[in-house]
Amino acid sequence: MNGMSLAMQTREILKKKDEIAFRQGRNPKKIRLLAVSKGHSSDLIRQANVLGLSDFGENYYQEWKGKVDLLSDLKIQWHFIGHLQSNKVNQIVGKVSLIHSVDSLGLAQLISQRAQKLSLKQNVLVEINFGEETKSGISPVLFEKEIFQWSQLQGINLCGLMVLPPLSTQKENSRIYFKKTAQLLDQWRFHMTDHSWDELSMGTSHDYEIAIEEGATIFRVGTALFGPRT
């Protein structure tokens, strides 16, 4: 993708975001575009940053680490959005703005322990899975059983929830999963008084408009922004 195309796509996506926010009576400044940069070059990330994007999401530790080194001169908020293996916790905690993919109490405990050793709190999202076997995430039922234990972890700030709906050719099919995730966030606010608990990471290139309509505060766009991955 050339710079002109990237600029046009960025403007178009941000325009849609603002239009939907105003239509829903929401503040568009409280809805963030997360540029999913996995599989794309550091040069393309640099171009996107020049265009005003500051939040970038990566799935794989090695790829992310290489880009961090190459782009250390930029003001970037890195997000880890892929499945986080327990043996990579020490390398990720304290180095990214937000981990979207915390999918078990055990992983949350490891992150908390590492963060406490570093004398910090790591911002995380709980990844919710509504029963799709091919994806990571914790079921809403199990999370509700464990929510008190999650809320007591001292080394993490539970910022909210993340969801990846089942793949479907009809983007409208995602709406029910976004709606349920938003309801779950609201339902358990009273347990999270020591955490920020206000983020909903929902929506991709395929269905981000619906995600924003249903309350997304972060929407994750890769292909619609950067084009196909190389």
Image: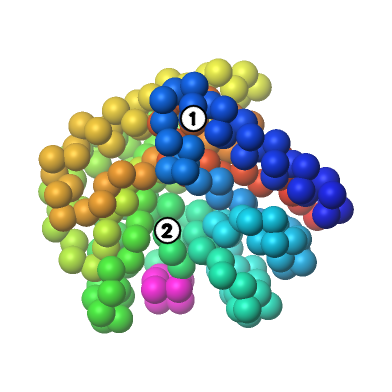
- The quadrant of the picture occupied by the C terminus is bottom right
Q: Identify residue type, mark 2.
A: Ile
Q: Which stretch did the figure color magenta? A: 87-95
Reading the image, the residue beneath label 2 is 99
Per the rendering, the mark at residue 21 is 1
- The location of residue 28, given as percent across then percent down, is 48, 37
When asked about the image quadrant of residue 131, the answer is: top left
Quick one: label 1, few (<14), some, or many (20+) residues within 10 Å? Answer: many
Residue 129 forms part of the magenta stretch: no
Residue 89 forms part of the magenta stretch: yes
Q: Identify residue type, mark 1.
A: Ala
- The location of residue 133, given as percent across then percent down, is 46, 36
Q: Is residue 111 visible?
A: yes
- The location of residue 65, given as percent across then percent down, is 59, 74
Residue at image coords 19%, 37%: 188
Taking 223 as reference, is 202 left or right? left
Residue 45 vs 189, above or below: the answer is below
When asked about the image quadrant of residue 11, the answer is: top right
Q: Dot 2 lies on which element?
A: strand
Per the rendering, the mark at residue 204 is none
Dot in front, 1 or 2: 1
